[in-house]
């Protein structure tokens, strides 16, 4: 019981510190230091010495290099016309499906997610084209915004994914296998979204305007989609053929993007300057949170809280279903207030030992966790995708959240299906081992 109270005290302290408006990086470091001193009865000098060693070691992790590189890749693409080509390339293939070019939100986000790794970048890049076009052509505003909000979150699940890199670093799980595990669940969620659009538009045809003649032939559309397919092939091919690690593949992706933009005569000094500035801000935020989370993980480990808490929960003899339900509710609540990377790094020292002791595969749990984090992207008050869409559409945040709710439910359904059929996530990672 003492272990549970200590863990609860640390969680409350984290929420208190962050609730006061302290930066996540500083907040986690403060909580780590106070935990060692107050709960662990460690002297200030010794606590400082322990945390300083961990700070240096974590900041020098080679795997962290993938984060700014994937962000840079997404920033460069965002500032090019590749997203416009993506829309025009998908248009001829979606017009015959019930729901028409509403499906470009889903397919476009799924494709761009495979070269981005960021939910916000995926939503913004695809949305800057589709929101305007769908409104101009008379598609239902609520359905177009909701489908984009939901599909944009695929940037966290379909590889390469920044959250999966973070999870892999913390859990010491193969990032390549995590990437493979995210492919089929990503396809499942995209299929559920498209299925819902088909159902809604068949039931209420007025949601979708009369079909317009194609302005782009299918052969030309393939040519328009080639830049995205090329980048996906280069990045994922480098990883899965063993030519490059995920960190090295990120560098390969940046190089391929620069070469592509030079060939298309779109690369400029201003573009590079803006992309580098945004990358610096985003990657500094992500990496600083990761380093401070390592401090908190060390403090938790020093106090033996993860293992003792895992033993305590195991003693409760919860069924696997109840354990997953409790964790799902826990993560959905966290998603109301925190971003995905913060949720991962703060909670994993506690939840991962519990999951492993309960017999769940850590790779499967990584995918399950990412889906739960995706839910936080479309729930107020801190749903990043909602704010991105508010800026793109000018709609009130409450209206954007309401439009996103059906896709929130569909993502919950995907998580439930993944629990029933874990092979959806585990088949590809373990295919080579059979």
Image: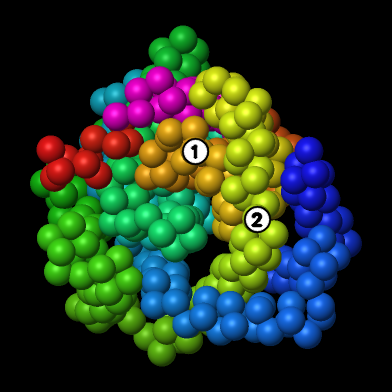
Residue 5 seen in this snapshot: yes
- Name the main secondary structure of what is drawn in magenta: helix
Q: Residue at x 27, y 47 (%)?
A: 180
Residue tagged by mark 2? 304
Q: Is residue 372 above or below residue 299?
A: above
Q: Quadrant of the N terminus?
A: top right
Identify the residue at horizontal 47%, vertical 17% (top origin).
Answer: 200
Estimate the spatial distance between the alpha carbons at disc 1 and disc 2, rounded to whole Å: 15 Å
CB contact under 8 Å: marks 1 and 2: no
Q: Position of residue 157 (x, y in %)?
A: 41, 46
Q: What segment is highlighted magenta in the picture?
A: 404-423
Dot 1: within a 10 Å radius of its alpha carbon, few (fewer than 14), some, or many (20 or more) residues? some
Earlier residue among tags 1 and 2: 2
The number of callouts visible is: 2
Q: Nearer the viewer, residue 161 or 57?
A: 57
Residue 343 percent across, percent down from the top left: 62, 52
The residue under label 1 is 357
Q: Nearer the viewer, residue 401 or 53?
A: 53
Label 1 residue SS: helix
The answer to whether residue 205 shows anywhere in this view is no
- Residue at image location 35% in from the left, 29% down from the top: 422
| Residue 117 point in image, percent of width and height | 41, 58
In the image, what residue occupies the spot 29% across and 29% down? 423
Q: Is residue 91 magenta?
A: no
Quadrant that contains the C terminus: top left
Give the residue furthest to the bottom: 269
């Amino acid at each position: 019981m003492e272990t549970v109270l200590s863990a609860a005290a640390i969680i409350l302290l984290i929420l208190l510190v962050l609730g006061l408006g302290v930066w996540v990086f500083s907040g986690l470091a403060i909580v780590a230091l106070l935990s060692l001193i107050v709960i662990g009865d460690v002297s200030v000098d010794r606590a400082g010495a322990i945390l300083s060693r961990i700070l240096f070691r974590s900041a020098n992790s080679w795997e962290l290099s993938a984060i700014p590189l994937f962000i840079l890749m997404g920033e460069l693409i965002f500032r090019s016309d590749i997203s416009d080509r993506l829309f025009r390339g998908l248009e001829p293939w979606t017009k015959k499906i019930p729901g028409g070019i509403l499906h470009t939100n889903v397919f476009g986000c799924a494709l761009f997610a495979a070269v981005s790794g960021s939910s916000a970048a995926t939503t913004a890049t695809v949305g800057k084209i589709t929101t305007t076009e769908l409104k101009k052509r008379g598609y239902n505003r609520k359905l177009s915004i909701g489908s984009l909000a939901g599909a944009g979150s695929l940037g966290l699940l379909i590889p390469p994914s920044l959250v999966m890199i973070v999870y892999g670093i913390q859990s010491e799980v193969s990032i390549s296998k995590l990437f493979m595990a995210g492919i089929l669940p990503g396809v499942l969620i995209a299929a559920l979204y498209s299925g819902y659009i088909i159902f809604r538009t068949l039931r209420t045809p007025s949601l979708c305007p009369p079909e317009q003649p194609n302005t782009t032939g299918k052969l030309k559309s393939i040519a328009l989609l080639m830049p995205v397919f090329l980048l996906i092939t280069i990045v994922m091919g480098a990883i899965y053929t063993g030519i490059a690690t995920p960190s090295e593949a990120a560098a390969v992706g940046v190089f391929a993007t620069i070469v592509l933009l030079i060939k298309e005569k779109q690369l400029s000094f201003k573009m590079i300057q803006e992309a580098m500035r945004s990358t610096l801000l985003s990657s500094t935020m992500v990496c600083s949170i990761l380093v401070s989370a390592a401090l908190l993980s060390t403090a938790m480990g020093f106090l033996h809280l993860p293992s003792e808490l895992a033993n305590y929960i195991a003693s409760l003899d919860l069924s696997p279903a109840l354990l997953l339900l409790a964790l799902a509710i826990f993560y959905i609540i966290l998603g109301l207030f925190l971003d995905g990377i913060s949720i991962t790094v703060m909670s994993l020292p506690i939840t991962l030992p519990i999951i492993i002791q309960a017999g769940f595969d850590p790779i499967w749990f990584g995918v399950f966790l990412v889906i739960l984090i995706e839910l936080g992207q479309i729930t107020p008050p801190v749903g990043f995708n909602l704010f991105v869409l508010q800026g793109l559409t000018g709609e009130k945040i409450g209206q954007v959240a309401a439009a996103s709710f059906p896709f929130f439910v569909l993502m919950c359904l995907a998580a439930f299906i993944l629990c029933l059929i874990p092979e959806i996530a585990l088949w590809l990672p373990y295919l080579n081992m059979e």
